[in-house]
Image (tube, helix red, strand yellow):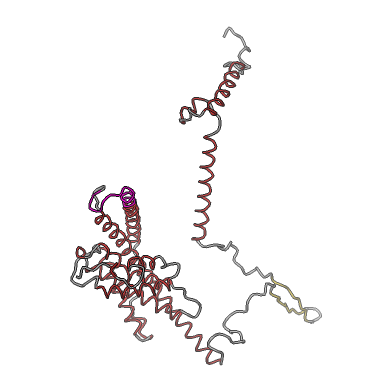
Amino acid sequence: MMDVSPDDDGSSDQTVTERYFAAISLVESSPDQCISLLDAIQKDIDALSLFSKNETMEDISTKSIPFLAVEHFMATALVNLPAGPGAMKKRKSNILQSLTLWGQFLERLEVLEVLTKEETTEYHDLLDEQQQHFRNDGDDDNDRSNQVPLSAPPNRDIKIARFKARQQRQKEIEQLKALRERRNRCGIAEEDEMDGYDQDSLDRSLAMAELFIHKGDALENWSQSMRELPMIEMMVKMEADRQNMDRHAGNPLDGSSNHPDPRRPPPPSGKGLQVTHITKDSTTGQLQFQRDEIRSKVFRPGWSQPTMTLEELGEREYQQAMEREERQKQAEANKKNEPRRYEDLVRDGMEDNAELVEASAKLDREWDDWKDANPRGSGNKMANRGDKNF
């Protein structure tokens, strides 16, 4: 491997590393922009020859470790791209491309011996499932009954273990970042150690911890995308069937026809349904007409429908909890400055506050006066009643 730093590229004012971290920050907010930036960064990485097939993890420099996850972030950005109505083909293409990128990312980590035994097994199971799906996708529809079902439910124990491992790695990353900030504040030289780390070993441990999180996320997202793929394919087929029906009916393919779709129920008008009952009088033989109006809400569910998603509910409860915590802190701060007895001031370490000491002295005097006016047992009105001889 060539000993080339990713920051050696002088094509722009920003280094490749700065462009990389700026790009991955847009994975969720602006995935289309993130993809274009990561694609350009991938070309720069190939031009710099940062990685080779016959190297080990020890051969990769610390500054190059974050670039191992370029394919993972590109796949995540592809999955995050919005898919509007009638764009299921594009959604399917994005998912298939993301599966290929996650496969390349995990394949490289397997060669570098970064994956654990369980992660390697899960990676190969997902790879086999993906290849089986591609084979089934090329089969004829008449042979679908003999195909192996895809997208089995994920192992719950694996998901729990991955979640706990991610939490542990996240805590480790926070500790390493705090240690790096301490080194910067203290102005410690790069070769000097603090808490068992010099600058290079600290940066490398931090990069490896983040890489471990990325590989877990890649396995989880790959599994979720494989479960989503059959539903997307079904929607693609439904869109194709609808376009064929519109074509045979002479309607434009863009859905701009003025004729309503007979398969779809008319939109609700908000009015009740009118029903006419026709009966025959048994005596006169005349027909009788009776028109009834059914309430518009009679066919609605009898239970309350959800008004928000679980994510929105969690966000609202989180905000309410933060507000309660803030009010509690404010109340405790206000109570701390309220006058109270001197022994309470000593307990809280506020005996040096002259204003509170003076106020506490007044409270103590009032308390002593009350005790003098109300001696112990004075409230017992039954004490002097009854026979004293018993």
Report which quarter residue 385 is drawn in: top right
Residue that appears at 63% across and 17% down: 381
Instruction: Locate the N terminus by quadrant.
Output: bottom left
The residue closer to the viewer here, 310 or 43, is: 43
- Asked if the magenta segment contains residue 4, the reply would be no
Q: Position of residue 145 (x, y in %)?
A: 36, 81
- Apparent side of residue 228 relative to residue 385 in the rendered image (left or right): left
- Apparent side of residue 74 relative to residue 312 in the rendered image (left or right): left
- Apparent side of residue 343 relative to residue 95 in the rendered image (left or right): right
Report which quarter residue 16 is drawn in: bottom left
Q: Which residue occupies the extreme right position in the image?
A: 284
Q: How many marks?
A: 0
Instruction: Locate the C terminus by quadrant.
Output: top right
Q: Position of residue 235 (x, y in %)?
A: 46, 79
Q: Which residues are magenta?
A: 178-193
Q: Position of residue 185 (x, y in %)?
A: 34, 49
User: Is residue 17 placed above or below 100 in the rendered structure?
Assistant: above
User: Is residue 373 placed above or below 139 in the rendered structure?
Assistant: above
Residue that appears at 50% across and 87% down: 243
Residue that appears at 59% across and 87% down: 257
- Asked if the magenta segment contains residue 182, the reply would be yes
Q: Which residue occupies the extreme left position in the image?
A: 54
User: Is residue 326 placed above or below 207 in the rendered structure?
Assistant: above
User: Is residue 60 placed above or below 189 in the rendered structure?
Assistant: below
Report which quarter residue 299 is drawn in: bottom right
